[in-house]
Amino acid sequence: MAAVEIAGFAERIRIDTQQAHNETENSVFVSELLEGKLTVEAHAELIAQSWFIYDALERIGRTYADDPIVGPVLSDDLLRIPALEADLEFLIGDDWRNRISPLPATEAYVQRLEQVAASSPEAFLAHHYLRYLGDLSGGQIIRRMLERAYGYQRDGLRFYIFDGIPKPKPFKDEYRAKLDAAPLDAAQQQAVIDEAILVYGLNRALFQDLAGNIDRYRVRA
């Protein structure tokens, strides 16, 4: 009888969140943006909302630097705020800080990050994993589609470019190995999975908020 291979924790997260992931992928706003059906302003709005999320994510991440659960997966090579700010300056202008504001779904997302800031490293781990592994995976597909749709080269796409990670696959493999080795008991592992499903819901709500303004962003024939 062949031995049954037991999936590692990273694989469990992927499997147990697959439905939530699929539901989030089907976003009208993102689909039309990647097809070039929306204006550059729509992309700028997506980057602006991402800035609010990553500003909280990376600020809170620094407080977990010495945590045995979160600390091992933190990496300066992942940090996105400098890239997001460069994109916002390119897309909006030098005064971008005065011209952006969070949507209600973004405020809810940031509020959730603040809630787990001091109390739940396993919940924060879920946020970190989904954002950055997503950026290194599907984010690279988004980058190529935006290049084709809007003619960007590097400016406007820096959010998706990881200069310190020239080969994403080895980095992602190492990240997943750290997840597998994280000192989490069964209850904590389930907490990571539950939070990951919640994070997909937060992303889905953000895409719905963005879609609420989609008519103003559609390219006119």
Image (tube, helix red, strand yellow):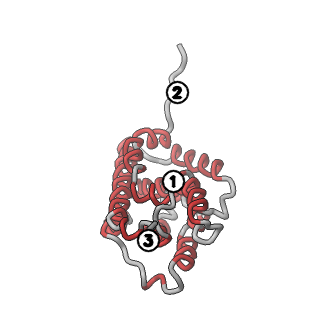
Q: Which residue is mark 2?
A: 5
Q: Amino acid at mark 3?
A: Glu
Looking at the image, is mark 3 or mark 2 nearer the viewer? 3
**Residue 47 appears left or right of 103:** right
Q: CA distance from mark 3 to mark 2?
A: 44 Å
Per the model, the C-alpha gap separating discs 1 and 2 is 26 Å
At numbered mark 1, what does the secondary structure look like: helix, strand or loop? helix
Query: What amino acid is found at the position of numbered circle 1 in the picture?
Result: Gly
Question: Which residue is disc 3 drawn over?
Answer: 45
The answer to whether mark 1 and mark 2 are in CB contact below 8 A is no
Residue at horizontal 68 percent and vertical 53 percent from the top: 167
Q: Is residue 175 above or below residue 107?
A: above
Image coordinates of residue 221 in percent, x first then y, are 46, 66
Name the residue rendered at 59%, 49% in the picture.
172
Query: Which of the marked residues, 1 or 2, is nearer the chain's N terminus?
Result: 2
**Residue at (49, 86) in percent of width and height:** 95
- Return the residue nearer the eye: 216 or 153: 216
